[in-house]
Image: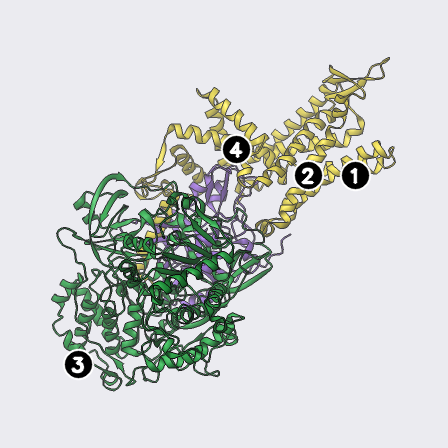
Chain colours: A green, B yellow, C purple
């Protein structure tokens, strides 16, 4: 029974989201804090260093941390406002329980734990172990990610554990494993500085990873050419040397065409291809018909631009290719990624200074969280749960019988489908707000409503948590020590600045107690986060993501260590593949043939417009925390429908008109934002909002067959004028309804 | 910066002299040829006359500056127009709200308003009591045969009486005590801010921010000292208290025209600025050619163009345009547009 | 009275073309203690319908500030380092002359408080030898605070320019704008 206990308005009234602002003269103690705690921002994969001001066990403000090598004090607006998630009036201060007709009432921990464990046991006894699933998230530290992987398999004994990285960059991970046998950005960002050409595909760097901008601008100061592939003229594209406004879904066609031009002009590194790669011939055979006319037709980019980009890329001596969700959120996400890797391998520009490639992972611990057993098919050290040797090693580390180790489970969206089929009856989630972040979220809501028992660990009552039977009041980023791995593969230290408020608990403690009550106390007997990390080090040893040589002390002393780091005297590996020995079985990089295929839902007469989604700079993911910070909301209060004036003209749409957007899955209304900075055939809506403001009511839930990433970036829609003007200034901008 | 401010100003000198002479004349008239003047207050009188001279001089110089002059002229022009009564009413309301009660400060910070209100009320009341006494305009006498009734003489005319020991007498004779208490509370509150507020700590100066507060506290404390002395110490320390009080007050009076306290007189201009905006709105708004939005009154823009030219700034552009026709946002965009163009013409946006 | 540690070797450099419009500077500006949660920096779209171009504007700290000249209340003070301070709160009468006269569109009128406020180059930080908040956090380094040598080394093809021509009026400033090499003035037509 996971329906809302009372009307959504009542829940919002009590639990928010409400806008919070600092007092006019700053928080008490802002001027004379008790201490400054060096830690990191919680809001993206850059993991910028920041110093939090602490006064009387509360966060009173921040100070830039100028010594931290990646960001040297630089921050984005979310980073500056990061400290505002603390002291927030919406914070859950106790565990709460759903009471039909009443809402959520505070309960004591004994009750919350007792009922949860009883329900887990009841459901598992009745329907089988796998009927109780777990969803997790990668804003959690490495320690928590690792422990949750172990918790699900050892204590919960379910195969169905997955995480929100499934909607982040799993397709990049899949592509990287196929090509390199290892899933990490191949270089530290420092290698951007002197790259001659930087190609950025589907990564709105200036809004989603603002602090990475400095590295790109620095490269340009040093003469780098910048190529941006994006359907919109994002801030980064405005001044780029080339902006390729690709039609959503046309990425692999573009990179296939570029590869063909490289081959035709012999802009290839034959030595590298011959000695260090496999699959080249099949790969170029796959693109042999992708001439410029074909490419123009399938990418929506003019021939001229495609050729110029290919030439710029082909002739460069050093280069860096970056991509992110723009090419990854597709039913051919892995293919898109492989098409990028193909042009990198063809150029031979990898494993050398200023020659790099990588995905820019989005979430706070998007890198580390995807390495240590958080995924339905994975064990620590980025091991494979279906590989007998891997299973054996981890079972030994965990002290269990290999036969008791569950097998491969369902991925995040497949779990939702399994709930609908009645295979999953109970769920525990942490750090995940699927009701906002998963596609076709009306379907997700219906699934939540079908659960017999749903328990959620969170700091705020998120849109998803509103459907829970029990919500356990967990800890904020600044309330628990640990490590995270940044998007460049640097393991950094998160420090506990304050202790959690009285009746809330550290996430780690909650997981450990649940494990103990499920009868596995001895396997979750960690006194400190460092103890967990030390077990993780052993568990990851010998895996591709090898952390064995990393210790807390080393991390602190060096302000971060790049994995792989195999021994205690290993300084870490900022740049991969310098020895040209790849992590594949044959130690070669693998070309993978990619044939272009269209997106799963292409526009037609009935649904003639392409809908794509993305982010804005002032919000983070599902907004569970950032949609509560006043100044961030004020910067961009509500999602707008970006539309080109020519398309707008066809429908008679003017700026601020309220437009109904319909897809085969749902409909929602958004004010129009008429701008020339988007393709004429495409509209864009940012996805951070829930309820009736949610863009994910519209998106399609088709998954990439390999990585199971949903196709957030392309679906077909129709537009309809409502005749009303959209609100330019909402009276209650924090309002997010569920229905 | 103060281009017109460097040499002695003749006009101001004349005006200040007139003001000082007029004051002396009024003292003579009001005190009935010094008959009602208390010789003990001579130092205060000299100080006050100097202060009046100084304030008149400074005010006159100030008002000659083109922007101030314009505001002054416009305020008078707009006030004495066919909207005299509504504008007078508006100004009176604002006088109470913003000058006497300083409500606008509450929007900067509430405690700060409270502190300032205490300080200002104490000072203004004290002025209202001491100036007429010093000038001999008010004088208290006992009539022969009646040892218990005080008669107040205003400009030599009898203007009321009260009996010794009555509550009215207590309030009247202790008026300055109340003022001192208000000033002290206010000054301490303002001082506390200056100790704790990081922004103030960075920007304050001793002579402009601390000295006035110290002076006010010194005046209040020594004034209270006199009162304490004759109430509880039977005049044992009278000499000391009286002399230090006189010194601090005279210092204050001499300082009045030059330092921070000049803002008391300046503040009245806020009424003029408000009137200027009200009348300007009636006359019509200026629209920014860049944003297409109204952003100020056209009168204001036109006046500013003129005033800035008088001050040696010429923002005229080709085609009869002027940079000041743009709203602040329009100006920022114009700069960015020009910069982008220059960058593009330079061939490189980076490097 | 305040002990000042203002480092005159350090200077402010702006390059609006690097600005990505993220508003980090604006959020950070409000953390500066001289302006109590109010932001003094301006970030705005130039013409959003056509382009995502944004501009970022700090006070340029003019050598002969128009704002101070047109102030009827003598409320704007330029200190010995050339920093043009926010209006003296006791003097400012809230007339908006400075707001409308500043050629860069910098001062802000706080309507209710009858007070003009503007960027004072984070005087609480710069006078203590620290960098201004906005330039410290700016992720694109459209705002840079450092020495002239540093910026010349980092951006060898650009030239710091501190002279502007608005129609007939030349304005020289303490803050620099990064321009193509060999440029000596930014002309605003």
Query: Which of pointers 2 and 3 indicates the residue nearer the eye?
Result: 3
Sequence-wise first label, 4 or 2: 2
Q: Position of residue C8 (x, y in %)?
A: 54, 60
Task: Give the letter of the chain under mark 2.
Answer: B
Label 1 is found on which chain of the structure? B
Q: Which residue is mark 3?
A: A281
Note whether B133 is above or below A130 in the view shown.
Answer: above
* Same-chain check, marks 2 and 1: yes
Residue at figure coordinates x 21%, y 42% from the top left? A721
x, y percent for residue A109: 51, 57
Q: Nearer the viewer, residue A256 or A723?
A: A723
Looking at the image, is A644 positioned above or below residue B282? below
**Which residue position holds label 1?**
B244
Q: Which mark is residue A265?
A: none
Q: The numbered mark 4 sits on a residue in which chain?
A: B
Q: Earlier in the sequence, mark 1 or mark 4?
A: 1
Task: Give the CA distance from mark 4 to mark 3.
Answer: 81 Å
Circles 1 and 3 on the same chain:
no
Question: Dot 1, how many residues are within 10 Å of its Cα: few (below 14), some (14-19), or many (20+)?
Answer: some
Q: Quadrant of the C terminus of chain B?
A: bottom left
Identify the element where label 1 is drawn: helix
Task: Report whether C172 appears left or right of A286.
Answer: right
Q: CA distance from mark 1 to mark 4?
A: 36 Å
Q: Examine the rendering and report whether any part of residue A634 can be seen.
A: yes
Q: Position of residue B4 (x, y in %)?
A: 54, 40
Residue A158, compared with residue B198, is above or below; it is: below
Q: Residues within 10 Å of mark 2 (few under 14, many from 20)?
A: some
- Toward the viewer: A295 or A332? A332
Image quarter of residue A340:
bottom left
The residue located at (76%, 35%) in the rendering is B223
Residue under pointer 4: B270
Name the residue carrying label 2: B185
């Amino acid at each position: 029974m996971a329906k809302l206990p009372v009307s959504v308005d009542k829940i919002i009234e009590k639990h928010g989201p409400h806008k919070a602002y600092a007092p006019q003269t700053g928080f008490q103690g802002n001027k004379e804090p008790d201490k400054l705690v060096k830690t990191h921002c919680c809001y993206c994969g850059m993991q910028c260093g920041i110093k939090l001001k602490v006064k009387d066990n509360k966060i009173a403000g921040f100070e830039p941390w100028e010594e931290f090598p990646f960001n040297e004090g630089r921050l984005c607006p979310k980073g500056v406002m990061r400290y505002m998630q603390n002291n927030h009036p919406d914070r859950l201060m106790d565990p709460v329980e759903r009471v039909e007709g009443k809402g959520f009432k505070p309960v004591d921990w004994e009750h919350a734990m007792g009922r949860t464990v009883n329900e887990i046991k009841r459901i598992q006894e009745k329907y089988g172990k796998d009927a109780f699933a777990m969803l997790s998230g990668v804003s959690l530290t490495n320690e928590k990610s690792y422990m949750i992987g172990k918790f699900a398999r050892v204590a919960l004994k379910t195969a169905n554990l997955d995480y929100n990285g499934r909607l982040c960059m799993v397709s990049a991970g899949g592509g990287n494993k196929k090509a390199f046998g290892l899933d990490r950005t191949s270089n530290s960002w420092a290698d951007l500085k002197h790259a001659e050409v930087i190609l950025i595909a589907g990564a709105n760097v200036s809004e989603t990873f603002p602090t990475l901008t400095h590295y790109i601008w620095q490269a340009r100061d040093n003469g780098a050419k910048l190529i941006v592939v994006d359907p919109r003229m994002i801030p980064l594209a405005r001044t780029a040397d080339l902006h390729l406004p690709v039609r959503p879904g046309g990425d692999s066609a573009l990179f296939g065409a570029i590869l063909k031009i490289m081959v035709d002009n012999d802009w290839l590194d034959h030595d590298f291809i011959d000695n260090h790669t496999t699959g080249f011939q099949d790969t170029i055979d796959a693109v042999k018909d992708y001439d410029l006319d074909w490419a123009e037709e399938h990418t929506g980019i003019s021939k001229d631009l495609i050729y110029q980009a290919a030439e710029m890329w082909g002739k460069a001596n050093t280069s860096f290719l970056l991509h992110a969700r723009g090419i990854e959120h597709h039913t051919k996400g892995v293919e898109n990624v492989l098409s990028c890797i193909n042009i990198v391998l063809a150029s031979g520009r990898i494993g050398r200074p200023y020659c790099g490639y990588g995905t820019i992972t989005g979430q706070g611990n998007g890198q580390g969280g995807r390495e240590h057993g958080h995924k339905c098919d994975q064990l620590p050290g980025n091991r494979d749960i279906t590989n007998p040797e891997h299973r054996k090693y981890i079972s030994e580390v965990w002290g269990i019988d290999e036969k008791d180790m569950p097998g491969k489970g369902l991925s995040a969206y497949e779990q939702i489908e399994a709930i609908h089929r009645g295979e999953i009856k109970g769920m525990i989630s942490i750090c995940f707000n699927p009701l906002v972040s998963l596609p076709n979220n009306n379907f997700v809501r219906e699934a939540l409503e079908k659960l017999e028992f749903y328990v959620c660990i969170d700091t705020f009552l998120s849109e998803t948590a509103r459907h829970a039977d029990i919500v356990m009041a967990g800890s904020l980023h600044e309330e628990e020590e640990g490590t995270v791995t940044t998007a460049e593969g640097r393991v950094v230290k998160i420090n506990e600045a304050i202790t959690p408020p009285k009746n809330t608990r550290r996430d780690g403690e909650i997981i450990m107690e649940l494990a103990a009550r499920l009868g596995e106390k001895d396997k979750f007997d960690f006194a400190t986060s460092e103890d967990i990390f030390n077990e993780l080090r052993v568990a990851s040893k010998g895996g591709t993501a090898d952390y064995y040589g990393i210790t807390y002390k080393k991390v602190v002393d060096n302000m971060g260590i790049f994995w792989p780091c195999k021994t205690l005297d290993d300084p870490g590996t900022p740049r991969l593949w310098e020895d040209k020995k790849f992590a594949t079985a044959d130690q070669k990089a693998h070309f993978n043939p990619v044939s272009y295929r269209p997106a799963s839902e292409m526009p037609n007469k009935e649904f003639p417009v392409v809908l794509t989604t993305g982010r804005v700079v002032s919000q983070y993911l599902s907004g569970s925390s950032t949609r509560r910070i006043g100044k961030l909301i004020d910067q961009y209060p509500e999602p707008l429908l970006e539309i080109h004036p020519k398309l707008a003209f066809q429908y008679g749409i003017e700026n601020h008109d309220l437009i109904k957007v319909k897809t085969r899955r749902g409909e929602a209304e958004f004010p129009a934002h008429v701008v020339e900075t988007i393709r004429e055939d495409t509209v864009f809506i940012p996805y951070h909002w829930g309820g009736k403001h949610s863009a994910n009511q519209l998106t399609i839930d088709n998954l990439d067959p390999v990585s199971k990433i949903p196709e957030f970036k392309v679906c077909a829609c129709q537009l309809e004028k409502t005749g009303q003007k959209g609100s330019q200034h909402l009276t209650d901008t924090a309002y997010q309804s569920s229905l | 910066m103060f281009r017109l401010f460097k040499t002695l100003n003749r006009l101001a000198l004349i005006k200040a002299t007139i003001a000082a002479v007029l004051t002396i004349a009024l003292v003579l008239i009001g005190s009935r040829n010094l008959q009602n003047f208390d010789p003990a207050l001579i130092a205060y009188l000299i100080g006050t006359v100097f202060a009046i001279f100084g304030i008149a001089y400074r005010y006159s110089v100030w008002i000659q500056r083109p922007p101030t002059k314009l505001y002054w002229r416009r305020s008078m022009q707009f006030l004495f127009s066919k909207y005299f009564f509504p504008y007078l009413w508006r100004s009176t309301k604002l006088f109470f709200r913003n000058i006497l009660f300083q409500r606008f400060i509450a929007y900067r910070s509430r405690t700060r308003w409270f502190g300032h209100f205490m300080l200002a009320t104490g000072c203004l009341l004290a002025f209202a009591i001491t100036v007429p006494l010093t000038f001999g305009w008010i004088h208290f006498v006992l009539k022969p045969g009646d040892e218990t009734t005080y008669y107040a003489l205003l400009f030599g005319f009898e203007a009321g009486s009260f009996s010794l020991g009555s509550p009215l007498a207590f309030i009247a004779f202790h008026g300055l005590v109340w003022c001192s208490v208000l000033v002290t509370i206010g000054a301490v509150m303002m001082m506390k801010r200056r100790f704790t507020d990081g922004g103030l700590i960075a920007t304050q100066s001793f002579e402009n921010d601390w000295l006035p507060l110290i002076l006010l506290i010194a005046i209040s404390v020594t004034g209270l000292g006199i009162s304490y002395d004759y109430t509880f110490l039977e005049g044992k320390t009278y000499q000391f208290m009286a002399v230090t009080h006189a010194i601090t007050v005279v210092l204050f009076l001499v300082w009045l025209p030059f330092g921070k306290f000049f803002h008391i007189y300046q503040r009245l201009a806020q009424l003029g600025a408000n009137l200027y905006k009200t009348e300007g709105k009636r006359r019509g708004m200026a629209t920014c050619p860049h944003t297409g939005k109204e952003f100020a009154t056209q009168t204001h823009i036109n006046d500013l163009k003129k005033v800035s030219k008088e001050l040696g700034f010429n923002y005229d552009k080709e085609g009869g345009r002027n940079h000041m026709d743009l709203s602040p946002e329009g100006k920022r965009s114009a700069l960015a547009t020009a910069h982008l163009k220059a960058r593009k013409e330079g061939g490189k946006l980076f490097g | 009275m305040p002990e000042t540690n203002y480092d005159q070797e350090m200077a402010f450099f702006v390059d609006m073309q690097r600005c990505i419009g993220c508003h980090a500077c604006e959020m950070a500006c409000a953390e500066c203690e001289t302006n109590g949660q109010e932001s003094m920096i301006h970030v705005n779209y130039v013409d959003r319908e056509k382009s995502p171009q944004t501009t970022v504007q700090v006070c340029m700290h003019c050598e002969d500030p128009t704002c101070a000249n047109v102030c009827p209340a003598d409320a704007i003070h330029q200190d010995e380092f050339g920093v043009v301070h926010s209006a003296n709160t006791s003097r400012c009468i809230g007339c908006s002359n400075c707001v409308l006269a500043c050629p860069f569109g910098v001062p802000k009128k706080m309507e209710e408080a009858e007070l003009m406020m503007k960027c004072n180059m984070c005087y609480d930080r710069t006078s203590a030898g620290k960098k201004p908040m906005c330039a410290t956090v700016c992720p694109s380094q459209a705002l840079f605070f450092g020495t002239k040598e540093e910026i010349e080394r980092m951006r060898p093809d650009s030239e710091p320019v501190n002279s502007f021509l608005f129609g007939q009026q030349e304005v020289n400033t303490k803050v620099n704008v990064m321009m193509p090499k060999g440029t000596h003035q930014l002309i605003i037509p």
